[in-house]
């Protein structure tokens, strides 16, 4: 049934491992990206602007906040890493082979995605 849907939408010639823009996996990937973006929007001000893990807080409160916020941020960073991997498999109207998809992604947003994900994961290692 998925193959018929893919063929009907003009993406029937894709390899089995490539993600069609009209596939449910593509829609789930976009939903995951939106969810992780909103979590980042909510958690970043708590950590950097309001400094909820400040040393002036009571130790019990600081420990509770640390144990609840840090795993959420790790989950967001891991999700962005998964998104980078899935972007190498996401077909488009003009890119329908792995090689063309990968080259187009590396030339466009790959650098920005890596620079947004890797430094955050490296700095989070120091917080543990």
Image: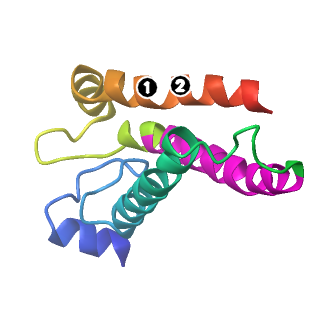
Q: Which residue lies furthest to the right in this view?
A: 60
Q: Does the magenta stretch include residue 22?
A: no
Residue 126 in percent (x, y) is at 74, 24
Q: In which quarter of the image is residue 127?
A: top right
Residue 39 in percent (x, y) is at 49, 58
The residue under the point 71% across, 50% down is: 71
Disc 2 crowd rating (10 Å Cα; few below 14, some 14-19, many 20+) is some
The residue under the point 37% across, 36% down is: 88
The residue under the point 54% across, 46% down is: 50
Residue 78 in percent (x, y) is at 59, 43
Q: Is residue 62 magenta?
A: yes
At mark 1, the secondary structure is: helix
* Residue placed most toward the observer, 51 or 80: 51
Q: Distance between the residues labelled 1 and 2?
A: 6 Å
Specify the principal SS of the magenta part: helix
Q: How is the image coloured?
A: rainbow
The magenta stretch spans which residues?
60-83
Answer left or right for 102 relative to 95.
right
* Residue placed most toward the observer, 39 or 8: 39
At mark 2, the secondary structure is: helix
Marks 1 and 2 close (CB-CB < 8 Å): yes
Residue where numbered disc 2 is placed: 118
Disc 1 crowd rating (10 Å Cα; few below 14, some 14-19, many 20+) is some
The residue under the point 37% across, 70% down is: 24
Q: Is residue 21 above or below residue 2?
A: above
Q: Is residue 41 above or below residue 86?
A: below
* Residue placed most toward the observer, 125 or 6: 125
Q: Which mark, residue 114?
A: 1
Answer left or right for 81 relative to 64.
left
């Amino acid at each position: 049934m998925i193959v018929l849907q893919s063929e009907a939408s003009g993406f029937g010639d894709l390899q089995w491992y490539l993600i069609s823009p009209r596939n449910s996996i593509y829609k789930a990937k976009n939903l995951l990206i939106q969810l992780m973006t909103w979590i980042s929007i909510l958690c970043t001000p708590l950590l950097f602007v309001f400094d909820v893990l400040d040393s002036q807080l009571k130790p019990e409160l600081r420990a509770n906040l640390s144990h609840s916020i840090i795993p959420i941020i790790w989950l967001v960073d891991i999700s962005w890493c998964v998104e980078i991997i899935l972007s190498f498999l996401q077909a488009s109207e003009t890119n329908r082979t792995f090689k063309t998809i990968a080259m187009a992604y590396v030339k466009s947003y790959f650098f920005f995605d890596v620079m947004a994900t890797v430094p955050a994961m490296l700095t989070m290692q120091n917080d543990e």
